Image: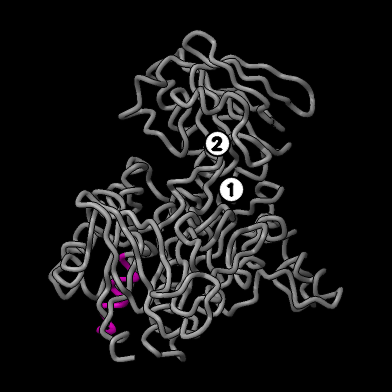
Amino acid sequence: MNMMANLPVVVIGAGPVGLAAAAHLVERGIRPLILERGESVGAALLEWGHVRVFSPWQYNIDAAARALLDRSGWTAPDMRGLPTGGEIVRDYLGPLAALASIAANLKLGAEVTAITRQGHDKVANDGRKDAPFVIRYRDAGGEHRVLARAAIDASGTWSRPNPIGVDGLPVAGEDAACGHIAYGIPDVVGKARESYAGKRVLVIGGGHSAINVALALMELQDAAPGTEIFWALRHASVDRLLGGGLNDQLPERGALGLAAKQAMADGRLNMLAAFAVNHIEMQGEGLAVDASLAGKPFSLSVDRIVVTTGFRPDLSFLGEIRIALDPAVEAPPALAPLIDPNFHSCGTVPAHGIRELAHPEPGFTIVGSKSYGRAPTFLMATGYEQVRSVVADIAGDHVAAREVRLVLPETGVCSADVVTGSDSAGCCGGPAPANVDACCVEDAGAKAKGASGCGCATGPSVGAKATEAVGVDA
């Protein structure tokens, strides 16, 4: 056991949540080893560095990380400001990574390829829990292996965007047309301007990432009037993507919905709902899209496609350790019911930690956006609470590990159909009757049937969700 105690805790990923995990480890006197596949901390955030997030700085900085930075003489940004992804890296993650206690334990350009237990494959039981983890990684110097007492996977989901197909698979011709397709939030008014100015662009997706892309294309349209924007939604209604508007306690998020609504009213966006692509074919310098619209055959010729349909976790390097995942959401079984988009369409998620994140492999956890599996929304502050709890558990402070220390603004955003501008936008089906002990209509209905509730208020503190744009590298 003494040998194990002297080993580092490996943190996979140097995004906001990975570096927060490292900060919590340092604060508890535990040596981290941070392995980041990119050439910079926050590498994924830099890929959407032009996008301004809708949560102010106060929700984007971890408490333990701030404590380390404050002791170094760091100048904090205005906590009320709304940073871009690039500013989060420049003004927060960069200075954090430069601290001696972090920098000495950070390896960039190090891609983890496998995790196992020393001397044990996935099936072996005897002595398993006492065996250290073996982490294999690859960098410019070749293949390496390191022993660890615990492993925290904060590698995010940015490297695995969802494909176009509504069935979860690439559509026919998607791979061949990859040179004309972007995934995520391309910088259409900046670095990628020439690829979009004056072009016919199809945006596929119904979340805040799609709104960001559509509004950026409208900005480009002002300078290049020939730019045409087609916005395709997989569902039949546009109401569910418009946000809580003025009801949203994160004003920037509500503003996105209001701006998109106004653009639709002005006729600047060609809305396509419900839309499903069947086939894509190269047509000269453009793309011929064969699809269905509201259940009927539909075809469209475009120059570019932007896919904003979310992301999924990369589980390829976890094949030799024991993990448990919900079969649908691909999140830990105890967490999945709290975030499953099939049942929970409120903009709220109960605070959670090691209890919900634990796997059958003691000492291994997945945190950050990857812990949500295929559930589409995540907030960095939620990830910070996760790693606070996980690191407390690693340190043997089980009381702190099971405490709830997360207070976030409730949101007016729901991903289900809502009546825009109505009080019903605040939660699942609207507020519960005044004489019922429930958080919303769906919660009241579930309790009336003998269930514990819909899950929106299962914890004492409820947090707002964010788009994948806010949590992709978390």
Q: Quadrant of residue 198?
A: top left
In the image, what residue occupies the spot 39% across and 29% down? 188
Q: Which residue is mark 2?
A: 260
* Percent of width and height locating residue 33: 27, 69
Q: Indicate whether 422 appears above or below 283.
A: below
416 relative to 102 in the view: left or right:
right
Instruction: Give x and y (percent) for residue 127.
Output: 46, 85
Q: Residues within 10 Å of mark 2 (few under 14, many from 20)?
A: many
Tell me the residue that label 1 is attached to.
Answer: 243
Number of the label disc, if any, that sits on residue 67: none
Which amino acid type corresponds to the residue marked 2 in the rendered image?
Answer: Ala
Residue 73: x %, y % from top left: 13, 70
Tell me the element at label 2: helix
As measured in the structure, the alpha-carbon distance from the residue carrying label 2 to the one carrying label 1 is 9 Å
**What is the three-letter code of the residue carrying label 1?**
Gly
Identify the residue shown where x is 64% and y is 54%.
414
**Residue range of the region highlighted in magenta in the rendering:** 19-29
Q: Quadrant of the N terminus?
A: bottom left
